[in-house]
Amino acid sequence: MRNKIIILGDSVSVHIIRWAKGIAECGFKVTVISNGGKEIEGIETILLGNQAGTRLGYIGLLPTVRHLIRKIAPNLVHSHYAIGYGLWGRCCGWRPFLISVWGSDIVEFPSNGLKRWGLRKILLSADYITATSEFLKQRTIRVAPEISSKIGIIPFGVEIPLIPTSSPSDKVRIIFLKTHRRKYGPDILLKAMYIVSAQNSNIMLTMAGEGEMTEGLQRMAREYQLEDSVKFVGFIDNAEVPKLLAEHDIMVMPSLAESFGVAALEASASGLPVIASNVGGIPEIVRDNITGILVPPSDAKSLAEAIVRLSHDVELRKRMGMAGREYVGGKYRWQENVRQMVQLYEKLIANKGI
């Protein structure tokens, strides 16, 4: 009989979709319970509440979640995200109980003493915790030092694609591939492009993604007279990301905060050098002057200098891109990360916790 796993997580998240399918492909019976969202193809998905997914919704749905878990009687409950879904797991009291922290639940959420106290209680209730980076692991331990012996690192890796032949271009093509939120620094990038445009008109920037800053960023591009060198392409489906990356020469990720940085992994896996801010977990992914260039956050001038440096040196771009592809393939290969999670599941199930 297959071991049954309940994943508590947002069913619209590409991360939850990939984890659920990856674990199911390893022979587990996976059920995802989500606050709102949509069905995951091929995975039993139970949708509760409304699309808003507010904290009040999580609390109000606790009796339903508790009933479902007891009815399904899984071999393990796995909450993705310490707050919200972590609260569900803690209050249901099922064992073994695993939490995967994602970043903002640890770095941004505990903004006051009460929230920090609640987050600590949730973390302490888990049999084990996984983080995606050493940075996030240490920040989690800072919230609850008692969990230092039961937390490990399992990255959210990427598949290593074949690199398709892209159409030649007389332009150096750089790409930003993040939600248009202030913490990801898209406005810093446009300021850098303004500086770059005064020195080099041969650089094109693709602004992929969308968000609350999109309209303001488009106005900013017009004010800086960057219409001919900046293209907004909107939301990109995850399945289309490798193709889009193959059409570019450099990835730029000027985040002000980043606990991991999957976009940088995807770029390196596709053979692109990465220019990124030296913050959070990014230095674990982007190796300075080896797979890319790290710059101070909020520093448009340094960002511009890095863009100009790579745009002028084709061989350096190729060398960094191939080094990044090799590095990601050795440490952040998705299939290996799924294997690590499966091994953890089996250990927790065998021992009813660690």
Image (cartoon, grey):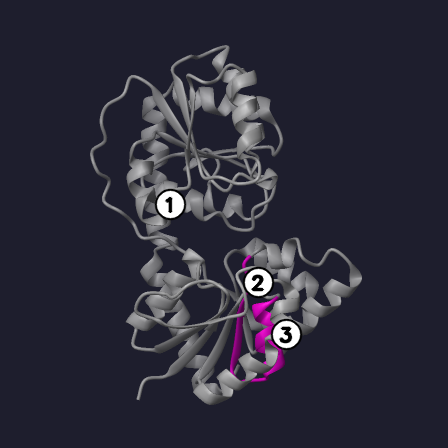
Q: Which residues are magenta?
A: 84-102
**Mark count:** 3
Judging depth in this view, the residue of 172 and 295 nearest the camera is 172
Which residue lies under the disc numbered 1? 266
Which residue lies under the disc numbered 2? 53
Amino acid on which disc 3 is placed: Gly
Residue 307 place in picture, x, y as percent:
46, 24
Q: Within 10 angstroms of label 3, few (less than 14), some, or many (20 or more) residues? A: few
Residue located at (44% from left, 85% from top): 74
Q: Within 10 angstroms of label 2, few (less than 14), some, or many (20 or more) residues? A: some
Could you tell me if residue 31 is visible in this image? yes
Which residue lies under the disc numbered 3? 60
> What is the distance, in whole Å, between disc 3 and disc 1 at their CAs?
38 Å
| 139 with respect to 232 (left or right) | right
Sequence-wise, the earlier of marks 3 and 2 is 2
Judging depth in this view, the residue of 270 and 180 nearest the camera is 180
Sequence-wise, the earlier of marks 3 and 1 is 3
Q: Residue furthest front?
A: 50
Amino acid on which disc 1 is placed: Glu
Residue located at (58% from left, 53% from top): 135
Sequence-wise, the earlier of marks 1 and 2 is 2
Amino acid on which disc 2 is placed: Gly
Specify the label residue 101 is tagged with.
Answer: none
User: Secondary structure beneath disc 1?
Assistant: helix
> What is the distance, in whole Å, between disc 1 and disc 2 at their CAs?
28 Å
| 117 with respect to 351 (left or right) | right
Residue 70 place in picture, x, y as percent:
50, 88
> What is the distance, in whole Å, between disc 3 and disc 2 at their CAs?
11 Å
Residue 166 place in picture, x, y as percent:
23, 31
